[in-house]
């Protein structure tokens, strides 16, 4: 059974990494964390006279640059002049050249929200009357391409590195002092430091392109890098690098002077004699200094991202710091425990006391995560409906489920810990057997017939000064000793069970960290719902220079399947060229609202060979779907097609014509 442990471990780790990679790759690109809530002229408006400036209003303050707002005429030529100004609050305006002719103009914007995420979009307005335009109103955000993917991956690596660095060090200081001299644990903590440092440098280089053009070539643009250093996120990344320099000194002391003092402590700095003042002072100094550095690293996230904006930012930032520290103590400590169980030498086993201490540390971390997580959820969601109606809420539900799974697996680990404690008597017998083995000459394994022959041969070799044979014999003895240590580690079924449960817990933690990374790149539910409400209000208002109106179409349908009959109604408001709000209602034969798996809309203006223009509305409630910002390029007799699907195979398309504009 023990011979199959390594392949199983490798297979499980590869599976976990694949799931995490799929989760990161399949996640939608980070959407705007600041939303455009209004503009002057309004989206889709037709104004009688040319405006002197274009103003944009966002849901929160944003950072603007020289080319953050561009206004393009129907031929794609820029008609804005000067840099964007911030006349008041969250409104930003750019002046226009005078004497603009009639036609449709496109406004494209590329800004950075206050929580560090890029915001991009475009809309149109018309002077006099709508016209054809060569400019596409769809704009790809700078975070949608390769640079955006690399930036997201860098964020994941930075979170993982922080967890390994802070959590691994906490495990050594609080749970298992001898781990300071275990090579595998040292490599784990140092790897966390290296990963966090490399990821921070990468994010600093990628930041300029990530928030502007999205081009790979701009990653090495020193001018962009200089601009990044002047921003809040740039200052946070530089501060993180400075703190990592202090963390390097902490690691050197932890695995240097502290590791030497740990030789006097068999399991923990408080055990055994453990009373030397120097040892206590060093432990206290490392604990205090490490906490300060870890809190500073966590603050570099809290002060530049979600927690720094929105409701109660002064409370949210320290809460976020505590939340990140609890995550690191739990996930990083868990990884350190897993490495110790698999790689610790037999002379320095992970004892029951160390596992029990980590169990208490993990329990405290989970309680802290629950308390801080409830506050963060309330702050970022704002309503129960946001759990299911927003991407942020849905990801948060996945995270909660993963935490529940981890807690359940941790309960199994506690059971194995208790069994390990009950088996300490058998461990004493094992120790006696080991002592019996040590009565043989130093450096030898228990004598077997073959080993006795080898020893005899070695004696002859040494007598004959055969250096080659001596070196070969030394390698054989080293391999025998390594196999003996592995045999002893795997012999205890309770320790083997604990290792398996901790491995499963660590596997869930990898996916949990991926979900957390995606959450930090996703628009908070409260902001998303507020933006939807503002957009709906804006789109339903009558356009400047036009009368208000609406078109309502009612069409019966029958998909031919079970419960396939009903009536679908389409409301289009204000039913003019430009920006429109669309609502779809599906009712059964008795007039009650019903849900169907899918509703799609297509708009076609056959006279001008335009369309079909697809519209995929979002579900609002039972029997009600809605879409805002539906662009209709010109007036005419439009064909409105509605596709209703009532099952996996039953669907039908019905249509009606409507005069729009």
Image (cartoon, helix red, strand yellow):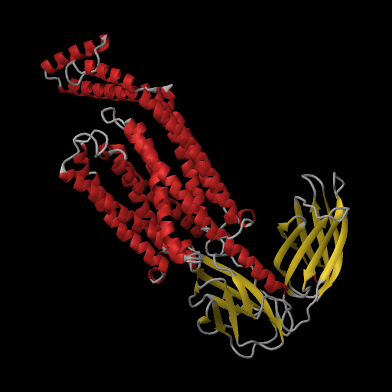
Out of 48 and 593, give the one closest to the viewer: 593
Q: Quadrant of the C terminus?
A: bottom right
- Residue 249: % across, % down: 24, 52
Question: Seen in the image, is 198 located left or right of residue 504?
Answer: left
The picture quadrant where one finds residue 457 is: top left
Out of 81 and 12, give the one closest to the viewer: 12
Q: Residue at x 61, y 66 (%)?
A: 530
Q: Quadrant of the N terminus?
A: top left
- Label total for image: 0
As drawn, the residue found furthest toward the top would be: 449
Question: Seen in the image, is 556 located left or right of residue 207?
Answer: right
| Residue 9 in view, yes or no | no
Determine whether 235 is above or below 518 in the image.
Answer: below
Q: Residue at x 33, y 50 (%)?
A: 193
Out of 440 and 282, give the one closest to the viewer: 282
- Residue 224: % across, % down: 42, 70
Question: Seen in the image, is 249 located left or right of residue 589?
Answer: left
Determine whether 147 is above or below 414 in the image.
Answer: below
Q: Residue at x 42, y 29 (%)?
A: 416
Q: Residue at x 18, y 21 (%)?
A: 470
- Residue 59: % across, % down: 57, 71
| Residue 337 in view, yes or no | yes
The picture quadrant where one finds residue 292 is: bottom left
Out of 123 and 168, give the one closest to the viewer: 168
- Residue 602: % across, % down: 78, 62
The picture quadrant where one finds residue 2 is: top left
As drawn, the residue found furthest toward the bottom would be: 99
């Amino acid at each position: 059974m023990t011979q199959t442990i390594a392949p199983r471990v490798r297979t499980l780790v590869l599976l976990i990494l694949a799931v995490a990679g799929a989760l990161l790759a399949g996640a939608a690109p980070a959407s705007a964390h600041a939303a455009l809530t209004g503009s002057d002229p309004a989206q889709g408006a037709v104004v009688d006279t040319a405006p002197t400036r274009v103003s944009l209003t966002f849901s929160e303050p944003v950072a603007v640059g020289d080319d953050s707002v561009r206004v393009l005429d129907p031929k794609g030529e820029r008609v804005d002049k000067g840099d964007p100004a911030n006349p008041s609050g969250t409104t930003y305006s750019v002046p226009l050249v005078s004497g603009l002719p009639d036609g449709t103009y496109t406004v494209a914007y590329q800004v950075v929200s206050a929580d560090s995420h890029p915001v991009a979009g475009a809309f149109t307005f018309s002077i006099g009357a709508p016209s054809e335009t060569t400019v596409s109103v769809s704009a790809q955000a700078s975070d949608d391409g390769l640079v955006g993917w690399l930036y997201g991956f860098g964020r994941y690596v930075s979170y993982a590195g922080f967890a390994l660095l802070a959590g691994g060090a906490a495990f050594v200081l609080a749970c298992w002092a001898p781990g300071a001299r275990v090579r595998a644990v040292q490599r784990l903590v140092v790897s966390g430091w290296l990963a966090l440092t490399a990821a921070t440098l990468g994010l600093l280089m990628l930041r300029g392109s990530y928030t502007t053009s999205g081009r790979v070539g701009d990653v090495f643009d020193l001018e962009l890098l200089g601009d990044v250093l002047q921003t809040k996120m740039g200052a946070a990344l530089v501060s993180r690098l400075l703190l990592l320099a202090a963390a390097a000194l902490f690691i050197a002391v932890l695995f240097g002077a502290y590791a030497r003092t740990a030789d006097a402590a068999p399991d923990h700095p408080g055990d055994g004699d453990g009373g030397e003042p120097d040892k206590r002072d060093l432990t206290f100094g490392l604990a205090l200094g490490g906490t300060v550095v870890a809190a500073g690293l966590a603050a570099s996230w809290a002060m530049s991202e979600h927690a720094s904006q929105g409701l109660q930012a002064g409370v949210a930032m320290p809460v976020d710091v505590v939340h990140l520290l609890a995550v690191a103590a739990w996930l990083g400590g868990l990884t350190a425990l897993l490495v110790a169980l698999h790689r610790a030498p037999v002379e320095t086993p992970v004892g029951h006391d160390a596992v029990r201490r980590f169990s208490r540390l993990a329990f405290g971390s989970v309680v802290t995560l629950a308390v801080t997580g409830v506050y963060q959820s309330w702050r970022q969601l704002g309503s129960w409906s946001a759990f299911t109606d927003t991407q942020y809420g849905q990801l948060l539900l996945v995270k909660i489920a993963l935490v529940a799974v981890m807690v359940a697996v941790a309960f199994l680990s506690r059971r194995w810990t208790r069994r390990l404690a009950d088996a300490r008597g058998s461990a004493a017998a094992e120790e006696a057997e080991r002592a019996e083995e040590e009565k043989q000459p130093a450096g030898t394994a228990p004598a077997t017939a073959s080993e006795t022959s080898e020893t005899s041969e070695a004696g002859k070799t040494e007598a004959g000064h055969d250096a080659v044979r001596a070196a070969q014999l030394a390698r054989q003895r080293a391999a025998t000793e390594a196999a003996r240590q592995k045999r002893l580690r795997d012999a205890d079924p309770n320790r083997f069970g604990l290792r398996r449960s901790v491995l499963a817990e660590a596997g869930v933690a990898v996916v949990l960290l991926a979900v957390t990374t995606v959450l930090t790149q996703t628009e908070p539910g409260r902001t998303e719902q507020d933006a939807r409400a503002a957009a709906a209000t804006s789109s339903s208002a009558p356009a400047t220079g036009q009368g208000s109106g609406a078109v309502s179409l009612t069409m019966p349908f029958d998909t031919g399947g079970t419960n396939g009959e009903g009536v679908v109604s389409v409301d289009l408001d204000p039913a003019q060229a430009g920006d429109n709000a669309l609502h779809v209602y599906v009712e059964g034969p008795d007039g009650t609202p019903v849900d169907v798996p899918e509703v799609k809309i297509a708009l076609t203006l056959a006279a001008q060979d335009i369309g079909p223009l697809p519209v995929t509305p979002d579900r609002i409630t039972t029997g009600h779907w809605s879409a805002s910002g539906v662009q209709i390029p010109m007036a005419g007799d439009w064909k409105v097609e509605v596709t209703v699907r009532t099952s996996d195979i039953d669907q039908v398309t019905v249509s009606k014509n409507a005069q729009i504009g």
